[in-house]
């Protein structure tokens, strides 16, 4: 079986009313072993949310790192979040967080790229992992506004 079809079969099985958990996990692990970063991301996400596995943020972080090396935008966004706030045993590192947000944002066609663009804008606005640059943040905000990407942040403005 090709990696793509293993991943597709696993996600199809997972969406059933009564999925065969062992079958889903086995197919995803095999697809991951064959290098399908979608499967790697699914394993990360499911460990992180406690779907088909006991919630394990440290394990999720390991899979996110592997998927990010395979240029998975979702994994990059999640790694950015993990490094910004220190999830799953990631040592807080705002510079790494910014780098992962930026890498996710530049991937075209990814819905996650839209969310990552907001994170990049926020980083420039507040100076998170990068020098504060309100002018650039405003330019990114204009792009978000043009594209209908909503940004809501309840933090107080810091000058």
Image (spheres, rainbow, N blue to C red):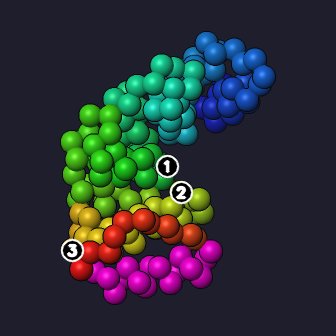
Q: In this view, does 41 lie above or below 135?
A: above
Q: Position of residue 10 (x, y in %)?
A: 66, 26
State the CA–CA distance, disc 3 to disc 2. 24 Å
Residue position for label 1: 74
Circle 2 residues within 10 Å: few <14, some 14–19, many ≥20: many
Precedes in sequence: disc 3 or disc 1: 1
Look at the image and tell me whether residue 103 can be seen: no
Residue shown at the point (36%, 35%) measured from the top left: 61
Whether residue 140 is in magenta: the answer is yes
Q: Is mark 3 on a helix, strand or loop?
A: loop
Question: Residue 22 at x, y = what percent?
Answer: 61, 12
Question: In the rendered picture of this protein, how many numbered marks are placed on residues?
Answer: 3
Q: Give the extent of the magenta segment.
A: 133-148
Q: Quadrant of residue 104?
A: bottom left
* Disc 3 crowd, CA 10 A, few/some/many (<14, 14-19, 20+): few
In the rendered image, the vertical position of residue 48 relative to residue 68, given as above or below? above
Q: How far apart are marks 3 and 1 (CA)?
A: 25 Å
Judging by the rendered image, the residue that carries numbered circle 3 is 131
Left or right of residue 78: residue 52: right
| Between marks 3 and 2 in the image, the one whose residue lies nearer the viewer | 3
Q: Nearer the viewer, residue 91 or 8?
A: 91
Q: Where is residue 159 in the image (x, y as percent from the top left)?
A: 24, 80
Q: From this viewpoint, is residue 144 visible?
A: yes
Magenta part, dominant SS: helix
Q: Mark 2 points at which residue?
A: 112
The residue depicted at 51 percent of the width and 61 percent of the height is: 115
Q: Is mark 2 on a helix, strand or loop?
A: helix
Q: Distance between the residues labelled 2 and 1?
A: 6 Å
Question: Does the residue at mark 2 contact the one at mark 1 (Cβ under 8 Å)?
Answer: yes
Residue farthest toward the right in the current orientation of the protein: 17
Pointer 3 with pointer 1, Cβ within 8 A: no
């Amino acid at each position: 079986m090709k990696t793509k079809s293993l991943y597709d079969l696993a996600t199809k099985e997972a969406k059933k009313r009564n999925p065969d958990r062992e079958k889903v996990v086995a197919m995803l692990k095999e697809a991951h072993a064959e290098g399908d970063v979608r499967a790697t991301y699914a394993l990360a996400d499911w460990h992180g949310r406690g779907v088909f596995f006991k919630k394990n943020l440290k394990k999720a972080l390991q899979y996110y790192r592997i998927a990010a090396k395979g240029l998975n935008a979702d994994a990059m966004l999640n790694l950015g979040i993990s490094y910004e706030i220190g999830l799953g045993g990631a040592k807080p590192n705002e510079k790494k967080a910014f780098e992962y947000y930026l890498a996710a944002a530049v991937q075209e066609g990814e819905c996650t790229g839209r969310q990552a663009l907001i994170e990049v804008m926020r980083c420039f606005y507040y100076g998170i992992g990068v020098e504060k640059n309100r002018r650039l943040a405003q330019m990114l905000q204009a792009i978000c506004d043009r594209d209908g990407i909503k940004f809501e942040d309840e933090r107080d403005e810091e000058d």
